[in-house]
Image (cartoon, rainbow, N blue to C red):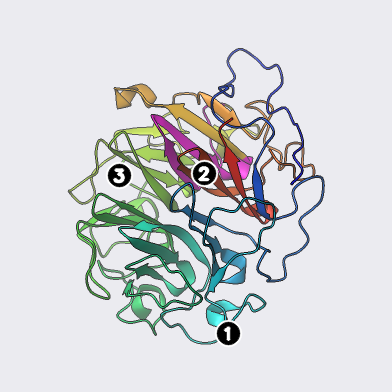
Amino acid sequence: MTQVKIRLTQPVAASDPVLPAHFLDPAGAAVILGGLGDAELPTAIAPTASSLFGPRGVCLAAETGPLWVADTGHHRLLGWQTCPQSDRQPADWVIGQLDFQQEGQNAKGNPHSASLSVPTGICLCGAGLAVADAWNHRILIWDTLPQDHNVPADRVLGQANFHSGEPNRGQFDTDADRLHWCYGVLYHAGKLLVADTGNRRILIWNQPPSENGQPADVVLGQPDFRSRNENGGGSPTARSMRWCHSMAIWQGNLVVADAGNNRILIWNGIPTDSNAPCAAVLGQPDFEQVELNQGQYLPSAKSLNMPYGVTVIGDWLLVADTANSRLLGWQGRSDLKALQNAPADLLIGQFDSQSKGENRFYGLPMRDSLCWPYAVQAVGNTLAIADSGNNRILLWRWP
């Protein structure tokens, strides 16, 4: 494995966020899965055990593994029994296709308990795994972590059974047991949270679902379970969403990446009442403004452009600012109101906070560059990044 020494930052204005020395190795990612990385465009997008096509989800169960990746463009999950230690290390398992060389939505057939169509979000779910199978409009749940090829899921949400795949169960209206383009999933302290993106809402199950098609208990982003309009059918507010995507729990508070409104929403705790308003917003000056990069061509340390991923590192919140091809970080505050429109404290992937080019200046992918990162996950000493535009997963470690 070749590592190229690349500076992550250059001298910038004093107001720019900088990279704290304890965060990420300045040599870049320790391991690259999929895209070739060093000074070569990732060209191998045909399905193999070591290729990836637009991956949008990553789940590292522990620092030592297993690792599961939502290889979105190939409509499959790839699994590594232990955390990979070398570039382009081939996967050990595949779910969603007959073998590593096949691709196609639902393996070019109909939905079933081990098929996938645009899988996106992926997370640990108790002792098992949950996957947002977005274009089958469902969440698949495995009670234990799969350790073989094409292990069937144990449970499905959003559909009445494993063989259905219509948005909102084939109805125009939605309800507590239906999903439409669900892109994100999070399990925390017995609660399951789903970003039901096409219905512009977050659904929360207060207990681990025990039955197929079980309805959710709480809805955020809409006035009730049957509404599905952008921003609740009105102007943006502290209660509304447009294109919610991923979630995290930061210092006990729910965080949602509301990509379509170019902002991050933060609640005080995890809401137990439906349609509860959030307490703070990042990326916008207030709850009513939603323009990308706050209406400016160039980004800033305060602005966002379609942020899709969020994760937590200690008391830090890390955001994949996807369309700006960068990561931004905010250190926790005791008062959520102090976060309102606060500038980021951390910048990764660009030379300064006014830059937004893919792979910095629209260049070739390097070990420390990003192109449309969709998902981020911190585990122990490793940050896993679904660097979707470069068709790769980065495993980047603390020095």
Mark 1 residue type: Lys
| Residue 299 locus on image (x, y percent) | 61, 31
Quadrant in the rendering for residue 311: top left
Write down the residue under mark 3: 239
Numbered disc 1: secondary structure: helix
Q: Secondary structure at mark 3?
A: loop
Is 2 part of what is drawn in magenta? Answer: no
Considering only order in the chain, which callout, 3 or 1, is on the residue closer to the N terminus? 1
The residue closer to the viewer here, 133 or 83, is 83
Per the image, label 2 sits on a secondary structure element best described as: loop
* Separation (CA) of disc 3 from disc 2: 18 Å
Q: Quadrant of the C terminus?
A: top right
- Residue 115 coordinates in the image, percent (x, y): 48, 78
The segment highlighted magenta reads: 301-325
Of badges 2 and 1, nearer the viewer stands 1
Q: Please tell me which residue is depicted at 53% across the width and 37% down the height of the picture.
A: 304
Q: Position of residue 105 (x, y in %)?
A: 56, 78
249 to 115, vertically: above or below: above
The residue under label 2 is 307
Contact, CB < 8 Å: mark 2 with mark 1? Answer: no
